[in-house]
Image (cartoon, grey):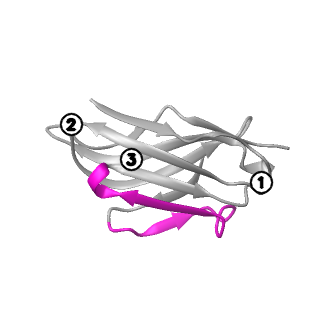
Amino acid sequence: QVQLVESGGGLVQPGGSLRLSCVASGSIFSINAMGWYRQAPGKERELAAVITSGGSTNYADSVKGRFTISRDNAKNTVYLQMNSLKPEDTAVYYCYANLRRLGVGVRAYWGQGTQVTVSS
């Protein structure tokens, strides 16, 4: 089994910051891309940021310059530093990992989600 466990969500005022963390554990052979998706009420899930095993990153236009994704390969952990938060960043944030399991192959795994609310 593989588990992705997120932490760091919460309530923050506009202009504030939060840091999300996600740890992948279980029978993992290797991890390719890791990232964060988000889903606001009434909207489809969308990519916020992704990072490859080599450190290449990609961001949604709406978060560029405000969010920074990073990872610690030794700890199977991905982070999302969110600065200058806006009310429209309010969403459930889901951790994502594309990884290879021993004897299973490559597929995508998801965390349970963590709520981020930006409000005064």
Disc with the residue nearer the chain's start (2 vs 1):
2
Distance of label 3 from label 2 (alpha carbons)? 13 Å
User: Judging from the image, what secondary structure is the residue with disc 1 in?
Assistant: loop
Q: Position of residue 95 (x, y in %)?
A: 48, 43
User: Judging from the image, what secondary structure is the residue with disc 2 in?
Assistant: loop
Per the rendered image, the range of residues in magenta is: 54-75
Task: Judge left or right: residue 19 versus residue 23.
Answer: right
Pointer 1 local density, CA inside 10 Å: few below 14, some 14–19, many at least 20: some
Residue hosting label 3: 97
Type of the residue with mark 2: Ser
Disc with the residue nearer the chain's start (3 vs 2):
2
Looking at the image, which is closer to me, 69 or 100?
Answer: 69
Residue hosting label 1: 86
Residue 27: give its label.
2
Distance of label 2 from label 1 (alpha carbons)? 37 Å
Residue 55 location, quadrant: bottom left
User: Judging from the image, what secondary structure is the residue with disc 3 in?
Assistant: strand
Looking at the image, which is closer to me, 99 or 4?
Answer: 4
Label 1 or label 3, whichever lies nearer to me, is: 1
